[in-house]
Image (cartoon, rainbow, N blue to C red):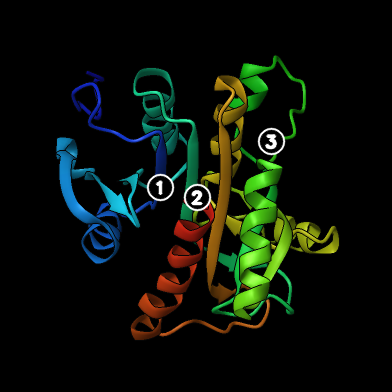
């Protein structure tokens, strides 16, 4: 039993979806999983396990930011035997071609966090997705006609950033979008020999100023989650 999740052995599947918002975890579980059971309420960071088309699936909230996600993902991988972990989140587009409602499939994650600089003693580690998961998701997105982009995402430690020039530099180098979790997820998956993918619905675009209305976010998020479930259960 881990400190922050507190589930008993066997209560968590080896395949876990990771929304940041614990209420999103509850929504995924109640909407898509049969016989979903809540295995954790510690700090209200909800986690659930149920079945999807006969396959056992867990959904665990992670909170916002790489330090918070790292706690939950580390415990899932180190103490509960999770082997496939997929972030289902939101992001802000950094290119004018990355429109709201599109999905960004993160091939790799760059970051301004010092977590990996400390871990690797100054070495620039390049955290990347599991190729089979990435390919499977992209093939399903293409078949479903869902607009998507595949490439690098930026995981920042600061939601409110005093360096607008950094955003411009990332744009110049073709970074697709910004969020706060992916680089840590991919790093931990590499450490524990697990498979990881991060897929993110574009909720706003920092270049065009376009923003997805709140009432439209659930449907766009649902499309992304359905593709994710199809990918991890194939």
Q: Specify the quadrant that holds the N terminus.
A: top left
Mark pair 2, 3: CA separation: 20 Å
Q: Earlier in the sequence, mark 2 or mark 3?
A: 3
- Residue 192 seen in the figure: yes
- Residue 153 seen in the figure: no
Residue 233 image label: none
**Mark 3–mark 1 contact, CB under 8 Å?**
no
Q: Position of residue 102 (x, y in %)?
A: 60, 75
Give the residue number, with chain letter if any, for mark 2: 232
What residue lies at 73% left-to-right and 79% top-to-bottom? Answer: 96
Dot 2: few (<14), some (14–19), or many (≥20) neighbours within 10 Å? some
Q: Which residue is outermost to the right?
A: 173
Which one is in front, 29 or 139?
139
Q: Position of residue 187 (x, y in %)?
A: 61, 30
Q: Position of residue 56 (x, y in %)?
A: 33, 44
Q: Earlier in the sequence, mark 1 or mark 2?
A: 1
In the displayed structure, 69 sits above or below 2; it is below
Q: Earlier in the sequence, mark 3 or mark 1?
A: 1
Q: Does dot 2 land on a helix, a strand or a loop?
A: helix
Which one is in front, 227 or 113?
227
Mark pair 3, 1: CA separation: 17 Å
Q: Does dot 3 land on a helix, a strand or a loop?
A: loop
Dot 1: few (<14), some (14–19), or many (≥20) neighbours within 10 Å? many
Indicate left or right for 8 with 73 as reference. Answer: left
In the displayed structure, 95 sits above or below 182; it is below
Give the residue number, with chain letter if any, for mark 3: 127
Give the residue number, with chain letter if any, for mark 1: 18
The quarter of the picture where residue 80 lies is top left
């Amino acid at each position: 039993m881990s400190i922050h999740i507190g589930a008993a052995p066997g209560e968590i599947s080896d395949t876990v979806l990771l929304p940041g918002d614990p209420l999103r975890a509850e929504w995924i579980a109640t909407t898509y999983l049969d016989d979903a059971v809540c295995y954790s309420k510690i700090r209200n960071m909800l986690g659930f396990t149920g079945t999807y088309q006969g396959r056992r699936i867990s959904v665990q909230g992670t909170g916002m930011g790489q330090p918070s996600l790292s706690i939950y993902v580390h415990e899932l991988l180190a103490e509960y035997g999770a082997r496939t972990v997929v972030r289902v989140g939101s992001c802000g587009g950094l290119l004018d071609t990355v429109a709201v409602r599109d999905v960004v499939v993160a091939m790799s994650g760059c970051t301004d966090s010092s977590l990996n600089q400390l871990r690797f003693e100054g070495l620039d580690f390049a955290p990347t997705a599991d190729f089979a998961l990435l390919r499977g998701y992209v093939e399903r997105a293409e078949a479903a006609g869902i607009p998507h982009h595949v490439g690098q995402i930026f995981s920042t430690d600061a939601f409110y950033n005093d360096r607008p020039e950094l955003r411009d530099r990332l744009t110049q180098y073709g970074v697709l979008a910004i969020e706060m979790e992916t680089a840590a997820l991919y790093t931990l998956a590499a450490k524990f020999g697990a498979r990881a993918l991060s897929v993110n619905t574009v909720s706003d675009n920092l270049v065009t100023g376009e923003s997805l209305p709140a009432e439209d976010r659930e449907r766009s998020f649902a499309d992304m989650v359905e593709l994710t479930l199809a990918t991890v259960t194939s």
